[in-house]
Image (cartoon, helix red, strand yellow):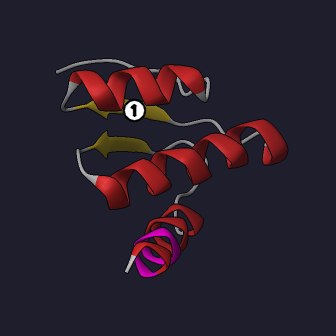
């Protein structure tokens, strides 16, 4: 099950386009999504802005250097 969640999170992150604003939710699949988006920010130089919905999402996005804002 965990591998399927990782695959889904990574696949969703692969759809992210440069310049997008992303809602960063909660849960295990979101963890993988944030991780992969962070890798893309680092490796591909995409520019995105995240809006975290939880403290956990905020911490993880910061670990991956994903710029954040709020509503």
Q: Is residue 9 above or below residue 47?
A: below
Which quarter of the rendering shows the C terminus?
Answer: top left
Q: Mark 1: few, some, or many residues within 10 Å (few <14, many ≥20)?
A: many
Magenta region, residue range: 4-8
Q: Is residue 47 left or right of residue 8?
A: right
Check the image and name the residue furthest to the front: 1
Identify the residue shown where x is 60% and y is 29%.
64
Q: Is residue 42 left or right of residue 29?
A: right
43 horizontally vs 31: left or right: right
Quarter where residue 29 is shown: bottom left
Main secondary structure of the magenta stretch: helix
Q: Is residue 7 above or below residue 14?
A: below
- Outermost right residue: 43
Image location (x, y in percent) of residue 34: 48, 45
Q: Nearer the viewer, residue 48 or 24?
A: 24
Q: The N terminus lies in which quarter of the figure? A: bottom left
The residue carrying mark 1 is: 50
What is the secondary structure assignment of the residue under circle 1? strand
Q: Is residue 60 magenta?
A: no
Q: Which percent across, then down, holds residue 13?
A: 52, 61
Q: Quarter-wise, where is residue 60 in the image?
A: top left
Residue at point 53% right, 37% down? 48
Q: What x and y, as percent, mark residue 51?
A: 30, 30
Which residue is depicted at the point 59% across and 67% down?
14
């Amino acid at each position: 099950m965990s591998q399927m969640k990782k695959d889904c999170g990574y696949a969703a992150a692969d759809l992210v386009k440069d310049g997008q604003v992303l809602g960063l939710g909660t849960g295990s699949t979101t963890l993988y999504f944030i991780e992969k988006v962070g890798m893309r920010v680092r490796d591909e130089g995409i520019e995105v802005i995240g809006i975290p919905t939880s403290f956990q999402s905020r911490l993880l996005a910061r670990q991956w250097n994903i710029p954040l804002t709020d509503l």
